[in-house]
Image (spheres, grey):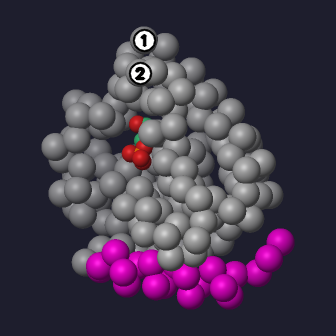
Amino acid sequence: MNIYLIGFMGAGKSTIAELLCDRLHMELVEMDERIVKEQGMPITGIFEKYGEDHFREIESALVRTIAEEGNTVVSCGGGVVIRPENTQEMKRSGKIVYLTAKPETIFERVRYSKDRPILNGNMNVEYIAQLMEKRRALYEAAADITVATDGRTKKEICDEIAEKIKEAPIC
Ligand code: S3P
């Protein structure tokens, strides 16, 4: 079984995934990092050269691969839930943890980031809030567990996930 961390850019997926995999003695996959490594170019480069659809194809192919690996904590890209087949694969192969944060918190965490093409030229709270609202139903429908991250330590967040994962029904 895998644990998939989903949520908006800057929700803390990568940071929490690193901590959680140590704690639960699982492997770690950071999806964007793996895509960058396999494609030999940064995410922004893939978007610029080949477009978002191509990036989403690569992302879906990676979800299918990871689903076969098992015992892995996966830090997903923020847009992974856009494609229903990704959510289906994740549900089939593990538990999905949705990390939430307020748009203001997200903004503070990502405001100086240059490697998030979706936010290039749109780095403001209003845009983040709008896009988050557009995706909210997808995140919520995918989630087995939801954990808020605003104003909390990494340890508190990990503790809550570890506790809730134990209780989450096994499909
Ligand atoms: C995206 C989120 C990014 C990355 C890509 C697209 C999105 O990942 O996959 O830039 O559509 O929300 P992070 O959530 O790790 O920033």
**Label 2, label 1: how far apart the Cα atoms are:** 10 Å
Q: Nearer the viewer, residue 106 or 138?
A: 106
Ligand 1 visible in quadrant:
top left
Q: Along the horizontal axis of the image, is 124 left or right of 60?
A: left
> In the image, is residue 69 above or below residue 15?
above
Q: Nearer the viewer, residue 105 or 136?
A: 105
Q: Is residue 84 above or below residue 129?
A: above
Location of residue 48 with respect to 44 vertically, above or below: above
> Considering the image in quadrants, where does the C terminus appear?
bottom right
Query: Callout 1, which amino acid?
Result: Lys
Percent coordinates x, y for residue 79 in the rendering: 51, 43
Q: Amino acid at mark 2?
A: Met
The residue furthest right is 171
Q: Which mark is residue 49?
A: 1
Q: Which mark is residue 41?
A: 2
> Which numbered disc, 2 or 1, marks the residue that appears first in the sequence?
2
* Mark 2 crowd level (few <14, some 14–19, many ≥20, 10 Å Cα): few
Tell me which secondary structure the magenta stretch mostly adopts: helix
Q: Are marks 2 and 1 in contact (CB under 8 Å)?
A: yes
What's the magenta region?
152-171
Give the residue at x 54% y 27%. 38
Residue 164 numbered mark, or none: none
- Image quadrant where residue 10 sits: bottom left
Question: What is the x, y in percent for residue 156?
Answer: 37, 84
